[in-house]
Amino acid sequence: MGLTIDNLHVELGRRAVLRGITASLAPGRVTAVLGANGAGKSTLLRACVALLLASSGQVMLDGRDVAVLPPRERAMALGYLPQDAAVHWNMLVRDLVKLGRLPHGDAGTAAIAAALSATDTAALADRPVRALSGGERARVLLARVLAGEPRWLLADEPLASLDPLHQLETLALLRAAAGRGMGVVLVLHDLTLAARVADDVLLLKDGMALAAGPVAEVLTEANLAAAYGVRVAILAQPEGPVIVPQAAA
Amino acid sequence: MRRTLLLVGLSVLVTGLFVASLMVGKAVVPLSAWWSDDPRWAIIAELRLPRAVLAVLLGGSLGLSGAVMQGWLRNPLADPGVLGTSGAAALGAVAAIVLGGATQWGIFAAAMACAAGGLALLAALTWRAETPAAFVLAGTVLAGLAAALTAFLISIAPDPYIVAAAIDWLMGALTDRGVEDLTHAAPFMLAGCGVLLATGRSLDALTLGPDAARSLGIGLPRLQAQVIAGAGLCVGAGVAVTGVVGFVGLVVPHMLRPVAGARPGALLVPSALGGAALVLAADVVCRLAPGAGEVRLGVAMALIGAPYFLVLLLGERGRSWA
């Protein structure tokens, strides 16, 4: 059970972006999807929420193909936070977060309040989105997904606009959500943060899964050199490993 | 609370302007005449009442269409005209005036047939399109083609009276529109409004972009079909009975966004009411023009709309419009 990716192939135009990825993601755990630019991380997330159709293979949620799930049921189960999420109108933060309740069709007052509180954005609720800093906006967009109370949260680079403090707070929030049973799948670029937050890592290279499994098994110097083409130093620290790129491999 | 106040305020405004529309004209008919045997009652019942109801429907459907188009295209400069439907309907009407008998029903039927043809062409051009930009481009092509054919038809008109009738009709007006026009157009406009009013939640979700909207369970092909069919019915039927009345769909959502909020779904009903108020007010002003004739509604709307946008442009320099 959980989110199972079975020999997934996705083509964009005539280009094969994902080429036979197989992985099993477990609820209650944080899985980091890592890989170099163009490795297929964002495409994998989009395919997991059925925004892209597989040319072959499938993504199964609790044994059911996500591509054929009713859209509302899929939306309630899988919360998706796109990369560089745009907000096209200058809405109030409260109205924006409320959008997370659309699949439920209810007011969801308690869920919205909890999402605002968890992302430290309750004080911003009555401000227009364009009055926010990049970091505040990123947290509000995360609150929008959390307000939907999905069973799975798939976020594409959710830390991109955040300062270090809010990066750590957001990771703690996502860890806590996983602790409550939510499956969390994150596309990340920061290897150190990935090593500290994730239970599991899915490492992609050229649209294929180079390695998958627990952090300590996947984030090795050899795997990272193969995935990114750089030699890295993995330094043990009390808070967790620090991964420092050294030079081209 | 603020939204309730806005809706009540706009409803009162529409009601007041509706009553004014019944009273005001070349002959002012006071309220006392409405409940007596005053012969001027006929002016109200037979001339002004259908005209005022048509103004409410036209303004409401154009204002609503504009709010929906702006939400769908995520662009505050969009208006119902971008689909090219109004140009296609105008082509049909001018064809009926120049080539046919130009009966009321003939003009309406030709305009609606061309509007439907325009929508079918739009659907054919964009059936695999993934972005709204494709619709804007296809709509621009359609509008350009319709404008060229309309000009061609006018150029081959057999006599100057027909040319004058076509140009007069193109300017857009509620003058002399009666119960027959109302009964032709109202079912299409009401059906279009019904379809458009159901798009609010989807437009709200689209604020986050197409991917996020789809991940929230919104079917974008269905939304696209709703927008095209709804706006096409509203604009096609409107143009078919009144000629081309521009700016309503563009200006009204702009005017109301600071009060109603930027959430697209929250703008729909206020824009319908605001559009009705604007067209009623403009039509009353048209009737008060000095002399025997009236200013054309399409001309009046352009005279209101263009300066409004100029003021907006000067006031909003360096700031986002959305």
Image: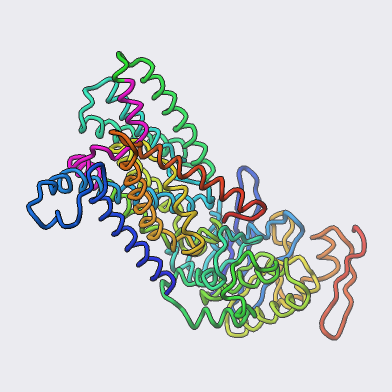
Q: Quadrant of residue A161?
A: bottom right
Q: Quadrant of the C terminus of chain A?
A: bottom right
Q: Is residue B185 magenta?
A: yes
Q: Position of residue B268 (x, y in %)?
A: 40, 58
Q: Residue at x 44, y 72 (%)?
A: B2
Q: How is the image coloured?
A: rainbow
Q: Residue at x 30, y 25 (%)?
A: B165
| Image-based side of B259 in relation to B152, left or right | right
Q: Nearer the viewer, residue B264 or A3?
A: B264
Q: Is residue A187 above or below residue A125?
A: above
- Horizontal side of residue A176 vs B95, given as left or right: right
**In front: A44, or B122?**
B122
Query: Which quadrant of the view contains residue A221?
Result: bottom right
Residue placed most toward the observer, B302 or A206: B302
For residue B73, side relative to residue A214 (left or right): left
Q: Position of residue B232 (x, y in %)?
A: 36, 43
In reply to whether residue A22 is colored magenta, the answer given is no
Residue at far right of view: A247
Task: Identify the main secondary structure in magenta.
Answer: helix
- Percent position of residue B142, x then y: 45, 32
Q: Is residue B105 above or below residue A32?
A: above
Left or right of residue A139: residue B212: left
Q: Position of residue B40 (x, y in %)?
A: 14, 46
| Range shown magenta | B163-186
Quarter of the image where one finds residue B143? top left
Q: Is residue B214 visible?
A: no
Residue furthest to the left in view is B37
Whether residue B100 is visible to the viewer of this picture, yes or no, is yes
Say how many tags the image has: 0
Residue shown at 60% from the left, 44% from the top: A13
Q: Residue at x 54, y 57 (%)?
A: A51
